[in-house]
Image (cartoon, coloured by chain):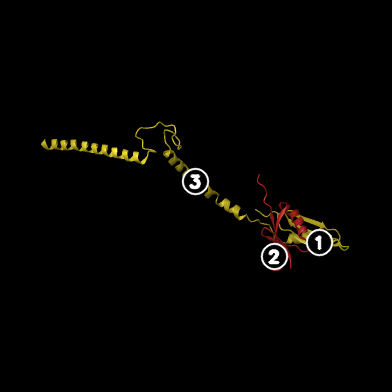
Chain colours: A yellow, B red
Amino acid sequence: MKTNDPKPITLIVTIYPPKKNARRVVVSGAPEGEMPLILDGLFPDRHALLDRVFALVLKRDPQVVTIAEPKTGKAKSITAGADDDEEAETTEEQDSDQLVKDVLVSPSTGSTEPDEELPEIEGDVTGASPEAVALFENQLNITVGALDSAAIEPEEEVVNDGEQD
Amino acid sequence: MANKIKYGDRELDMGDLTLEQAKQLMARHFPELADPQVDKKEDKNDTIYTFTKKAGRKG
């Protein structure tokens, strides 16, 4: 199958205004999409110029103009898939961040804003003075110590009961 | 010293054409060059006018 179908040849004749009593003629010709061939001469030679350009265009090898893709555009198209992947990763990261934020947010209020309207709780040390904190910790230690000693004594009794049996 | 037109990967000798005449001629053969961007470059003894299509608006 023949792939190189001949294209129509466009010949353009441009006749410029006379300078020093001579009209200049420029003839350019090329098949569509190819770099034109240019010849210039004087007005009386216009027909010969036309024939010459036509003959030379027929004889010459095709000179199709190839426009290189802009580097930025090409890079964009090449990395388009990678960009999508990055966006997907970013979205996943954002989702995981959002998940962490959701966990950190108080489930009762659903907000990270300071709880201004919550009722005061007795013994709550949040925002208390250092003295109040020290007093609370002392009381806590005393309470924990009492609980520990109370918890040890029954264990000894249980062990003793086991040994007797 | 020669003046040359470069468009894409092709070069063309301008002969005695002025730059304005070359623009008109190129626009007739390549309609996309009706309003071209032309970059002038001195290369050894030649002056090369590189024609490129101006980027149009999207949409």
Q: Give, as a three-letter code, the residue at label 2.
A: Glu
Residue carrying label 1: A49
Q: CA distance from mark 3 to mark 1?
A: 65 Å
Identify the residue at the far front of this view: A131
Q: Residues within 10 Å of mark 2 (few under 14, many from 20)?
A: few
Please provide percent x and percent y for residue B26.
74, 56
Of A5 and A134, which appears nearest the observer? Answer: A134
Residue under the image location 20 percent in, 38 percent down = A152
Q: CA distance from mark 2 to mark 3?
A: 48 Å
Residue carrying label 2: B42
Residue carrying label 3: A90
Residue under the image location 76 percent in, 59 percent down = B19
**Which mark is first along the chain, 1 or 3?**
1
In the displayed structure, would residue B2 be above or below residue A74? below
Label 3 with label 1: CB-CB less than 8 Å: no
Q: CA distance from mark 1 to mark 2?
A: 30 Å
Q: Are marks 3 and 1 on the same chain?
A: yes
In the displayed structure, would residue A97 be above or below residue A49? above
Q: Secondary structure at mark 2?
A: strand
Q: Tell me where residue A133 sits by quadrant.
A: top left
Q: Give, as a three-letter code, the residue at label 3.
A: Thr
Q: Give, as a three-letter code, the residue at label 1.
A: Leu
